[in-house]
Amino acid sequence: MEWVRRSALLSAASVLLLAAVIVLPGCGKDKKAETREGPGAGRTVGVVLSVGGLGDKSFNDLAHAGLMQAVREMGIRPVYGQPEQMAEDEKYLRDYAEQGFDLVVAVGFLMKDALEDVAPEYPETHFAIIDCIVEAPNVASLVFREHEGSFLVGALAQMKTRTGTVGFVGGMDIPLIHKFEVGYAEGARYVDPDAEVLISYVGSHPGAFHDPVRGKSLAIAQFDRGAEVIFHAAGSSGNGVIDAAAERGLYAIGVDANQNYMAPGHVLTSMIKRVDVAVLKTIESVVRGSFRPGVHEFGLANEGVGYALDEHNRDLLPPDILARVEDLKARIVSGEIKVTNYYDTISQDES
């Protein structure tokens, strides 16, 4: 689990690299950082963060950490933008392409439409997008097998509960988050077919990913109904879920980044989604001249997803539980256990 500990250090270390700040006309903040010598010296990479920006302790922070690691390892010149609303996404993408950046990364599925408009206008620019597929000859689509990692933490949750009831709090009610929900429920019910899985969503709009007050109230309602462990896939709204677990003396499960440190003893584990690795590997491919458009998938087999184990939660997970979860992981990787990908169920329904 060394990679889990490294990811926790990346965000803190990256702060030391920040330098001058510029504000683009009509936009939110756009920031540049100092560069170092390396194979990527002279190359510029722009990352457009999702609305909410840095400080979510999750998705955006991981993308930024991957960018900063590329600075340290390759010496690239990094720029990252923090749109204050979705309407600014396209301007950021176009501005970065217009400036001749070597790679422009769109962080999140909410930028799909904007990137589909911009990418064809700049065929010589490399683009990447996280969490959705954009079919274009200059776009790398970085997607994750969230259902696999969610299955494992669902199994962990069910092994830990005494009531037989666990919970899930999603951010925006969309298919991507249903991937987490379905995998989590399957993992819980694999351990106990009679498991009760409570499901709640913060909302049906992008703001659902950064409403910790609402996230906390939903978690409290689930704890009141008997849940002992709640998994969130809700961006910074999930911070409220973790707060509720700490207040009730129960457990939350973090998402994307390792969030175990946020409430030691009350975060059972975190479902790690290696956005930092996906960003770093894509930057590396541009530096090496091996950039490849199309779909790039990250799952349990290549450590693109997983669960976090560190000093903050090790005492919560005894050896017998860990051995059982590692066995489940091996069986998923081998194909013996097939975890439902919610996207596949949508395709079947449509056909």
Image (cartoon, rainbow, N blue to C red):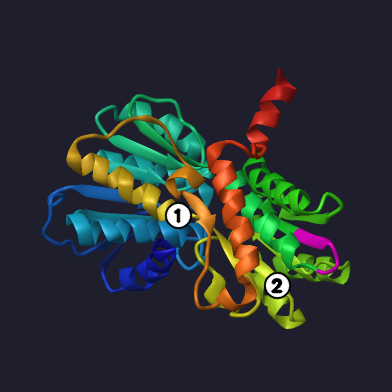
For discs 2 and 1, the disc positioned in front in the rendered view = 2
User: Magenta includes 166?
Assistant: yes
Could you tell me residue 139's position as x and y percent? 37, 32
Is residue 206 or residue 162 the one in the foreground? 162
Q: Tell me the amino acid under the disc marked 1.
A: Pro
Task: Return the residue at label 1.
Answer: 83
- Start-end of magenta stretch: 162-167
Q: Where is residue 290 in the image (x, y as percent from the top left)?
A: 23, 34
- SS at badge 2: strand
Q: How busy is the neighbourhood of tag 1: few (under 14 within 10 Å), some, or many (20 plus)?
A: many
Image quarter where the N terminus lies is bottom left
Q: Does the magenta stretch include residue 285?
A: no
Element at badge 1?
A: loop
> Is residue 22 visible in the rendered structure shown here?
yes
Q: Examine the rendering and report whether any part of residue 209 can be seen.
A: no
- Left or right: 305, with 104 as reference point: right
Q: What residue type is labelled 2?
A: Tyr
99 left or right, relative to 25:
left
Q: Which of 299 and 64 is in front in this view?
A: 299
User: Where does residue 113 sit, x and y in percent of width and height?
Assistant: 50, 34
Residue 219 lies, in percent from the top left, at: 76, 67
For label 2, the residue is 251
* Quadrant of residue 212 within the rendered picture: bottom right
Relative vertical location of residue 310 with respect to residue 92 in this rendering, above or below? below
